[in-house]
Amino acid sequence: MTVIKINAITVPAESGDELAQRFAARAGAVDGQEGFEGFELLKPADERTQWLVLTRWRDEESFQAWVSSPAFAEGHRSAAERAGGDAPKPVSTHSEIWNYEVAGGSTPA
Ligand code: HEM
């Protein structure tokens, strides 16, 4: 059964564009991970400062395997580091993981 793992990242409003750019230049290492079913980067459209990285996985084991894999580390190296440079300062001030499973829903008929 699909599990949903959300990384809720608090980013000051003035750093939001930088976070979006980091994701635009992401490594893409997660894309081929066994059990990975996709993710969305969700930008706050109100006064909130929590961006959500909503990821979907085939099961809990698939998510745990990714978190402890080299692909996770690679996916969290900035483009600057991958090009041999220094790590940029983090744009987030806080992050937390939210665990969800689908309990109901609908798609258009
Ligand atoms: C320690 C807390 C974390 C922070 C602050 C963080 C932040 C970031 C940032 C800034 C990027 C863009 C790449 C970069 O420049 O580094 C990224 C990539 C990503 N993050 Fe996180 N992240 C964290 C942990 C997690 C966790 C636990 C998940 C899953 C729920 C997750 C999901 C993703 C995904 C799917 C990508 C794209 C990876 C790829 O392209 O291979 N992150 N994260």
Image (cartoon, grey):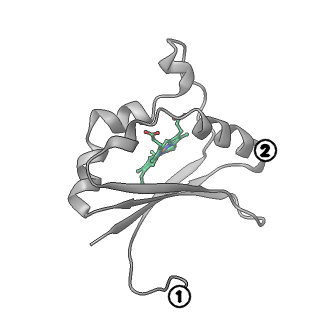
Foreground residue, 103 or 64? 103
Q: Name the amino acid type tagged 2.
A: Glu
Which residue shows up at 67% across the image and 57% down it? 43
Q: Position of residue 75 (x, y in %)?
A: 43, 35
Q: Position of residue 42 (x, y in %)?
A: 61, 58
Image quadrant where residue 58 sits: bottom left
Which residue shows up at 23% across the image and 48% down it? 65
| Quarter of the rendering occupied by the N terminus | bottom left
For disc 1, the marked residue is 109
| Eye-nearest disc, 2 or 1 | 1
Foreground residue, 36 or 23? 36
Q: Position of residue 100 (x, y in %)?
A: 39, 72
Q: Is residue 81 left or right of residue 17?
A: left
Seen in the picture, residue 78 relative to 32 is either above or below; the reply is above
Foreground residue, 43 or 91? 43
Residue 14 disc label: 2
Q: Is residue 107 left or right of residue 59?
A: right
Q: Name the amino acid type tagged 1.
A: Ala
Image quadrant where residue 71 sits: top left
Seen in the picture, residue 39 relative to 23 is either above or below; the reply is below
Q: Badge 2, how many Cα within 10 Å: few under 14, some, many 20+? A: few
Q: CA distance from mark 2 to mark 1?
A: 41 Å
